[in-house]
C-alpha cells in the first residue's frame, strides 16, 4: 500500500506543476476604478493590459510585471510566497475600487 504525503500549508494557490507565470485579472467595484492620479488604467479590467505574477527560477521569489507600463511602486517588491503576493495585490487594488477576479496559470 502506498502512502500519499501531503505538505499541509495555508497557501491555497500553490499546487504541484503550477505555472511560474500567472495572470491576475480584475473587476471594478462600485463601477469606478480609482488611481492616485485619477482613474485606473481601464485596460486592466477590459483585457488590454495584464498583470503577471512571475517566479524567478533561481531564487524562487515572486514579482509582478505589467504587459505594458510600470508596476506601481507599492508593488515593486519580491515575495517568498504566492499567497502573500495575492494578499498584497488584493489590498492595493481594493483601495482603487478593483477586486481580483481570477488568477490564470
Image (cartoon, rainbow, N blue to C red):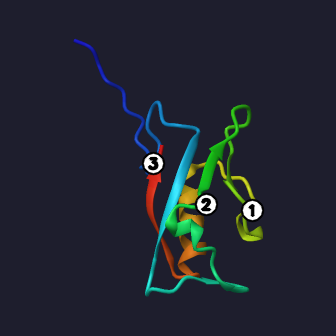
Q: Quadrant of residue 57?
A: top right
Alpha-carbon span between mark 3 and mark 1:
26 Å
Alpha-carbon span between mark 2 and mark 3:
23 Å
Q: Between residues 1 and 31, which one lies in front from this camera angle? A: 31
Picture residue at 67% right of the left edge, 52% below the top? 79
User: Label 2: which residue?
Assistant: 49
Picture residue at 51% right of the left edge, 86% below the top? 32
Residue density around tag 2, few if under 14, some if 14–19, many if 20 or more, within 10 Å:
some
Alpha-carbon span between mark 2 and mark 1:
9 Å
**Callout 3: SS:** loop
**Callout 1: SS:** loop
Q: Between residues 52 and 81, which one lies in front from this camera angle? A: 52
User: Label 1: which residue?
Assistant: 69
Which disc, if any, is residue 28? Answer: none
**Callout 2: SS:** loop
| Tag 2 near tag 1, CB within 8 Å | yes
| Tag 2 near tag 3, CB within 8 Å | no
Left or right for 31, reference 86: left
Picture residue at 76% right of the left edge, 63% below the top? 70
| Tag 3 near tag 1, CB within 8 Å | no
User: Label 3: which residue?
Assistant: 13
Q: What x and y, as percent, mark residue 93? A: 57, 74
Residue density around tag 1, few if under 14, some if 14–19, many if 20 or more, within 10 Å:
few
Q: On screen, 87 above or below 39?
A: above
Q: What x and y, as percent, mark residue 30? A: 43, 87
Q: What x and y, as percent, mark residue 75? A: 70, 65
Left or right for 89, reference 15: right
Q: On screen, 21 above or below 66?
A: above
Q: What x and y, as percent, mark residue 40? A: 63, 78
Amino acid at each position: 500500500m502506498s502512502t500519499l504525503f501531503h505538505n499541509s500549508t495555508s497557501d491555497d494557490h500553490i499546487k504541484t506543476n503550477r505555472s511560474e507565470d500567472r495572470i491576475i485579472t480584475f473587476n471594478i467595484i462600485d463601477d469606478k476604478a480609482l488611481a492616485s492620479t485619477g482613474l485606473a488604467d481601464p485596460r486592466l479590467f477590459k483585457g488590454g493590459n495584464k498583470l503577471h505574477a512571475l517566479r524567478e527560477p533561481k531564487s524562487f521569489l515572486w514579482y509582478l510585471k505589467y504587459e505594458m507600463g510600470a508596476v506601481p511602486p507599492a508593488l515593486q517588491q519580491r515575495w517568498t510566497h504566492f499567497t502573500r503576493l495575492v494578499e498584497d495585490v488584493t489590498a492595493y487594488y481594493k483601495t482603487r475600487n478593483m477586486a481580483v477576479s481570477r488568477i490564470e496559470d
